[in-house]
Image (tube, rainbow, N blue to C red):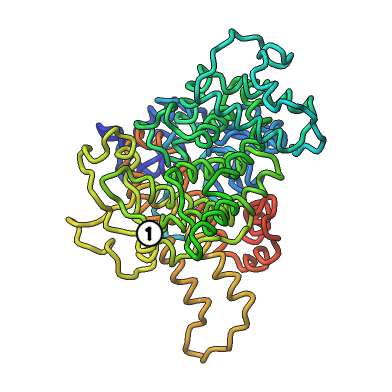
Amino acid sequence: MAVDEDDVLMPCTSVKLGCDGHNPCKTCKDKGLDCKYSRLEKLPSKEQLKPADSQSSDIGSIKFLLNHGTASFIECFSFPPSNERTSSSQAENPEPSYMVNFQEGDNYSFMLDPLENESIDMSVFDDENLIKFLSSPFNQTHQSDDIYASIFLDQSFDPAIDAVEWEAPSAASTAMIQSVISKAYALQINAEELDTISRQSNFLFAPSRLQRLKNQYFETWHRNCPILHQASFDLDTAPTPLLLSITLIGALYSQVDQEASAARTLLDIAEMHVYSIEDLTEEFEVRQTMRVSGSESVLSPLALPHLQAAYLMICAQFWGGNKAARKRAVELRFAVVVKIARKMGLNKARHSYNVDVDERLFNIMTSLDCAFSFFSNFPCRLTLSELQCDLVCDQTTFASSHPFSEPGSRLSRRLTLIEAFQALFGRKSSLQKTEADQVELNVMDLFILIHLLYVYTQVQIMLFASSPVPKPPPDDAKPFDTSLAHIKTALLRWRNMWTHLRNRTPVRIWNTLGFFNNAYNYWLVTQLLINNKSSASVLMGMEVNCEDALARLRALLRESGND
């Protein structure tokens, strides 16, 4: 594989779908490129990567992506393991899925999205070497005179939790424990269940553990969802709901079984607490409007961190919660987040001298809205006309203690999300400026745009399939064919930008980009939709908020000869 001095991946060999793994490979030989095989020697051989029961591995193909539906598609995303997902794939993938791609310094990133220079067609789905992929309500009544009687129980009382040295609770840990216990008591649970919640809370929210789980959060999930400014985040000043969300997510990633188990026990109750705080409830809205008759409710100064906490709780439940929690996150909780974001005007957020958390949160919310359609066939809540917020700055700049002191930082990207999406279809936008003044898209931008492209493609396919179209004159193009042509143009432009960005990004930077560097996988699935005549019938046959929409798309593989 050709590599320059800065360790930037060049367009040769293993970054190609057609790489044969030889030294030199056929691609480099034909193109006269210097084929560097040293990187490949550090990786498992093709034989090692092949399934034990098959000599014809299809790793890297669309068939492999959809082999086990959502589970195989998200295998590389470094998500915390959910109970259902873990049990369904445990026999085939004994390694913890959430540990994939977290080995610092390993040069595996070039396996994530090998691209080829051929025109877009279905043959891309036959090639190999793309990537090695990843992926309780209570009902009894508790009678007690003191609702906080069991909050500070001895941690060694629970036989499932090892005895630890007692720690004096901090203000943050006390507030977190009390919020969970009070919400658990409001559920009218029995004494045994309340004792369990109390012990798990005291164990998980111990002051020393809070700091470690916060660090665990920023080392794992933050790279997938950079909506908090890590350099300025402070445990002592952060609101309790936000602390609950990041601590539980950090614990879900923990390799300590007791911590992960405690997090799953507390997750539903913590979710209820987060969504019962002011700014997020109808009671707060009604109370505000009653005080000032006829006026809109005024959000509290903590509205933004409360919204961040609510959004992170959706992520925790959708990717790491049980089936009921996932459906609740999609159907109920995200609607609340969208409502508050609109009320705060985040859909029109502009980059300013402050850290760009406003537009950053809305950009990432947009991708999750599309992800619900992608993974669960749930209609998007956000419309294209709303996407008027600025694009976000590069993640390396955002991670700085003082982002605007970084070289190359600027006050504005000079491009909104809707303008970037329109540019893919060839409409006039700032992407068509002169080369010296061109606005380049980063990995997060392209990740969000391919989500929007998938949803747009899905809607167009179902629209023309369900609506009778008058027969056009012989010389006129059919509306659906015209729409398809525009989508294929957008997909080609997206792919060209992705290839350009991928080839000029150093490996050490690429490895820090979380699941954003897997955007090419969404492009493959969108290609599958746009190139199959049966797409409309498959999409129309899915129920809303189904358990695994990607598993249904496997039917399209048979038509294209990939199954």
Front one among 545 and 490: 545
Q: Residue at x 51, y 40 (%)?
A: 309
Q: In x, y percent, where is residue 388?
A: 38, 61
Q: Residue at x 40, y 34 (%)?
A: 512
Q: Residue at x 80, y 38 (%)?
A: 139
Point out the residue furthest to the bottom here.
473
Front one among 450 and 211: 211
Q: In x, y percent, where is residue 202?
A: 62, 20
Q: Answer above or below: position of 292 versus 217.
A: below
Point out the residue furthest to the right here.
140
Point out the residue furthest to the left here.
436
Q: In x, y percent, where is residue 486?
A: 44, 70
The answer to whether residue 513 of the structure is visible from this angle is yes
* Residue that badge 1 annotates: 348
Number of marks: 1
Element type where label 1 sits in the image: helix
The answer to whether residue 374 of the structure is visible from this angle is no
Residue 517: image quadrant is top left
Q: Quadrant of the N terminus?
A: top left
Q: Residue at x 62, y 83 (%)?
A: 468
Front one among 213 and 462: 213
Crowd around label 1: few <14 · some 14–19 · many ≥20 (10 Å): some
Q: Answer above or below: position of 49 versus 152.
A: below
Residue 226: image quadrant is top left
Question: Would residue 428 appear left or right of 214 to someone viewing this image?
Answer: left
Kind of residue indicated by mark 1:
Lys
